[in-house]
Image (tube, helix red, strand yellow):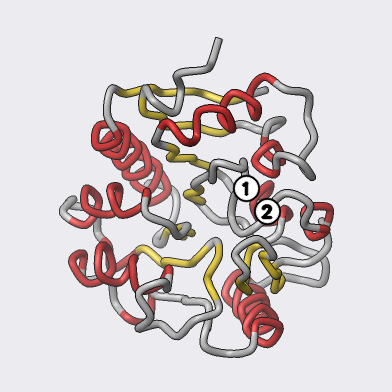
Amino acid sequence: MDARRHCFPTPQLAAAGCARHVGSLIEETFAEQSRATLAVSGGNTPKLLFAHRAGSSLPWDRVHVFWVDERAVPPADPRSNYRVAEESLIHPARIPERNVHRIHGEWTPDLAARRYANELREFFGLSEGEMPVFDVILCGMGSDAHTASLFPGEPAILDRERIAAAVRVTKLPQSRITLLPGPLLAARHLVFLVTGADKAEAVRAVFQEPPDPLKRPAQLVRDRRTAWFLDDAAASLLE
């Protein structure tokens, strides 16, 4: 596995370290081009990182923000991944509205997935069969080793052709829209922020068990270069 692991005593320190890393990657991108693309995940963990990044001196007006996944809810819903990012990052960092490319969770999931894929094709100027290449994708991971909204047993884990899809998370139950493996694997930089003792077994399995992405979806990226930021609790079972 070509992955770099960075461990910190607390979730807050892990988030701060991750934020510094993401910031440096964006700054490196600006040394090569006039804009940067950042795709962010949902859940509670990113809130820690957003708090650090929103106050940085990055030229946020040149950063375009996308989403790795979204719940099938309106943007004002407390469960909305967009709402979390809007409150914790987009508004505090004063990211222009034109740079915000949200998934329309209030639409039917299939329609929202198609519209999001089409927006990505247009933004990145993609030809048929090409994948968007994000400068930075920030992922989290669940206690079941899911990442994005690719949960264990989800057939879309094997899909390398499409950009995004609607999925049904049966154990919640809940519909979501998610990027598929193609864009995750194509990213210039892939970063994971994972904290909490409830993630320890999943972290151990992703790093130390034989690859089985259908069982442990985060293993999708185990053969490509990634940066993992963990707190000690999440890393506690690693050898």
Residue 59 in which image quadrant: bottom left
Q: Name the residue under label 1.
A: 146
Relative to 229, does residue 174 appear above or below in the rendering?
below
The reply to whether residue 136 is visible in this rendering is no
> Going 25% across and 51% down the picture, which residue do you hit?
53
> Going 41% across and 62% down the picture, which residue do you hit?
35
> Going 37% across and 43% down the picture, which residue do you hit?
22
Relative to 69, does residue 208 appear above or below in the rendering?
above
Quadrant holding the N terminus: top right
Position of 105 with respect to 16 (left or right) is right
**Which numbered disc flags the more N-terminal residue, 2 or 1?**
1
Q: Do labels 2 and 1 touch, CB within 8 Å? A: yes
Instruction: Name the amino acid, label 1.
Output: His
**Label 2 crowd (10 A; few <14 / some 14-19 / many >=20):** many
**Looking at the picture, how far across and down is residue 85, in whole percent?**
34, 66
Residue 223 in which image quadrant: top right
Q: Which mark is drawn over residue 151?
A: 2
